[in-house]
Image (tube, rainbow, N blue to C red):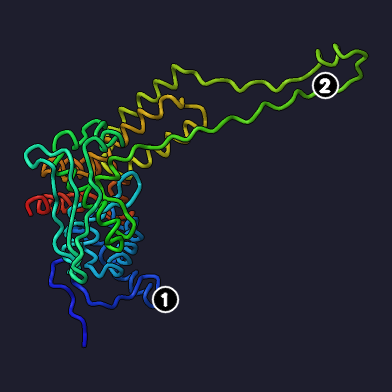
Amino acid sequence: MTDTPTSSALATTGNTSVGVFDGIEAFDAAQRMAKALSSSTLVPTAYQGQQGLANSLIALEMAGRMRLSPLVVMQNLSIIHGRPSWSSSFLIATVNASGRFTPLRFVFDDPAKPSSCYAAATDKASGEELIGETITLEMAKREGWSTKNGSKWLTMPGQMLRYRAASFWTRVYCPEVSLGLVTQEEAIDVEPVSVSVEPAPAPAPVLAAGTFTTAEEAVTAAVVEPEPEAPDTTEATQLADRAVERMAQLVTIRQVDDAIAWAEKAKQEALLLEADMPRIEKAAADRRKLLAAPLTVAQRQTLVSALASDGEAFRAEFGLAADAELAPAITQRQHQEWFNAQR
């Protein structure tokens, strides 16, 4: 008897699946599908064009393992701080659509003014009630989730408690749903980790060539390697100021990632100070968060116009050939973005 997939908008494929990396034939077929998907303007920007081809392949692999439509995976998988992350609502929907559990429910200490919440569901096979960890606002404060600028924990605590309780529950009772990935809200709440490395000890003095009659002469003639010249703090700070200002003008997450890579290189070359890196990283995190948010019609038009001012950036962002005419491509893209925003 053949199993029938769960009737849900999420469960769209059968029980058997072939992974992208299960063989040469599967990989070749997946490349053709990925190329078709990456040429569409209906998939998110991270999957579009030649640069999004590899991301599309990964999305196909994940969709096959989860038995979901590739478009569903693409629409609910975002890159936050360079890490793939699910939307919490997608995670909840996937658990509910699996058919293995009763729908997730969320229990608050005080529904009118909640300060704690846990997720619970019943395993249909065993009848056991599965209760997740209790998430509290005090925990959010201790972990630093609610102390960041613009944190949603301060403006919508009930919803954030639900989302975090759902991600904790899924990680314990249904980890195959998340495939080990964090949620978008968790990725945004994670603070960058700074790693300090102790400098190596200074090399011993090298004695100059010659013959010395006393120990004093030998010490006087010692040649000590000169200390590296410290960077000009004024120029370094001014450069950091320009980097922070420039970060607010970037229009794609890819550009933000490139800007951070430049800042790291500049720090290694002593053009930027270590003390200035946190504010540059914060500006980048704020810009990523803003760019990852849903765009209004005006914001979509602004994005296309900003990219259009740099022909090379526009071609790279939307996967156009180097000899493609920009004018009709820009017009077509603007119409498409307007159409998408109306849906």
Name the residue nearer the viewer: 315 or 61: 61
Disc 1 is placed on an element classified as: loop
**Residue 87 in picture, x, y percent from top left:** 22, 52
Q: Is residue 34 left or right of residue 117?
A: right
**Residue 170 in picture, x, y percent from top left:** 25, 57
Are there few (<14), some (14-19), or many (20+) residues within 10 Å of tag 2? few
Picture disc at residue 253: none
Name the residue nearer the viewer: 267 or 63: 63
- Residue drawn where x is 16% and y is 73% of the image: 6
Identity of the amino acid at label 2?
Answer: Ala
Task: Calculate the distance from the C-alpha at mark 1 to the C-alpha at mark 2.
Answer: 65 Å
Residue tagged by mark 2? Answer: 208
**Residue 301 in picture, x, y percent from top left:** 15, 43
Q: Is residue 276 left or right of residue 321?
A: right
- Residue drawn where x is 29% and y is 70% of the image: 64
Picture disc at residue 23: 1
Instruction: Work out which residue is located at the far bottom of the displayed protein and give it.
Output: 1
Q: Is residue 325 visible?
A: no
